[in-house]
Image (cartoon, rainbow, N blue to C red):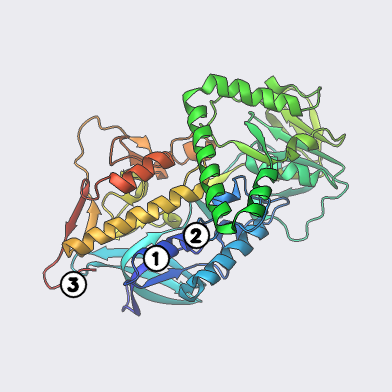
Amino acid sequence: MGDIAEHHDLLVLGAGLSGINTAHVLREQLPHRKVTILEGRSVIGGTWNFFKYPGFRSDSNMTVFGFKWHPWPHDHKIASGPEIASYLEDAARKDGIMDHIRLRHKVTHCEWRDEDQFWSLTVDAEGTERVFAANFVFLCTGYYSFDRALDAVIPGLDSFAGTVAHPQWWPRDFDYADKKVVIVGSGATAVTMLPVIAETAAQVTMLQRSPSYVISMPSKLAAEKLLRAVLPRSWSDWFCWWKDLGLETALTRFLIYFPNASRRALTWLAKKQLPADVDVNVHFNPRYNPTQQRLCMCPDGDFFKALHRDNSRIVTDVVETVTPDGVLLKSGRKLDADVIITATGLYFEIMNGMQPVVNGKPIDGGAHYTWRGGMLEALPNMGYVFGYVVQSWTPGADTMAKLLVKVIKRMEDKKATKVVPTLVRYEGMPRNLAVDVNSSYILRAADRIPKVTGEDPWYGRTHWLRDVWALWFGSVDEGLAYSAVEGKKDI
């Protein structure tokens, strides 16, 4: 580490949805503290300014996926990536957060020493390496890498004579009109892309090794439009936020507690919207229960409607090999293709893949336990803001930001300069993943995901009711060790 160039108080890493909301919470609840955001890219918005593939959009209801303090201004509830990026910038500007954001400031290394009682962060600041110090660091960097995708072995792909495109690095101005397109994948990305590509492609095939659950969601509700017409906008926004959060929470709980009934309902709903020649038991009957992976949402049934087109189809099979002009399947079937899109998943990582160093020792996040899903054992004065994977992200991220505020207020009460989660380990301690889903990209990242015991306070991201209960009534002493070094001021 070089000489400290700047000393910051509360430092937020990442100016995406979580970072902007966390900065708002910090500035609102800790007005006496100074907040700075470091963003590695040249724009804010995170995910929503990164992906450029056709049809990129949210698969959550924007009423609750957006900010409660800056309500979603449009009538439609499912939004495109550019719309969400514009919304986030508008929120940051109106809240005054833009003035606290440093763009093109990417943290490459961070280190804590007890004799300092602050984090030293190596930052690529617009091409120049500088060292910043921070009293408390908030990691709002999401849960996947921008630089790499999930490795997926597709036999023979190198022999393909056409175009291979990955959604994470979509070719600029790529024209797939009048071409035969095969989308390899079964998740939200594939479900999102198919209806848009089908509008101009000669043929589009979604090739999945195993099915996912897909459910339609209305993009607009007439009742909400009427509500906004008769009530002040602030009242209708408040009502719609609680309504939609309540419905989402209730639906998720139902899917968890009644998996068999949920499976029957989801497959029945899919069958009602599919063409007669599409077998729901083959293509929409997953091997897992609902909520073990995220439900794929499609606005106004656009995905199901696309499958009624003559140029759209879904195939459930395993790739034998890619040939120069298509994909040969294990069943012996051949899919002709000019374009293959590898929608095969994200590469999971927290902390932008960094390994923080504490008193000279690198800390491997996947080897440690998480305190209430927001602080990591052995990492002092650092929290990571993580939302929900199978529900709307934002309510969970917001609750976590507010919980970390409670920790900082407790530090102030105790005049502490350091707080660190401390766990007494014992033989046979449960070692479960903090993210409790069985998606391939999660299971393959098991060694990189923090661990949980499942018991308070060592649990991961579960659901809003549990997290908000912990926020209101949970202890910020249990599992945390507060301390101060003589001669150091409290943060």
Instruction: State which quarter of the image contains the N terminus.
Output: bottom left
Q: In this rendering, would 310 be left or right of 419?
A: right
Residue at which label 3 appears: 489
Tags 2 and 1 touching, CB below 8 Å: yes
Amino acid identity at mark 2? Trp
Q: Residue beneath label 2, please?
A: 69
- The residues bearing labels 3 and 1 have C-alpha atoms spaced at a distance of 23 Å
Helix, strand or loop under label 1: helix
Q: Which mark is residue 365?
A: none
Which badge, 3 or 1, is on the more N-terminal residue?
A: 1
Residue 54 sits above or below residue 456 on the image: below
Q: Position of residue 301 (x, y in %)?
A: 73, 37
Which residue type does callout 1 highlight?
A: Glu
Mark 3: which secondary structure? loop
Q: Tag 2, which secondary structure?
A: loop
For disc 1, the marked residue is 28
Q: Residues within 10 Å of mark 2 (few under 14, many from 20)?
A: few
Q: Quadrant of the C terminus?
A: bottom left
Is residue 384 in view from this perspective?
no
Question: In the figure, is residue 334 to the left or right of 265?
Answer: right
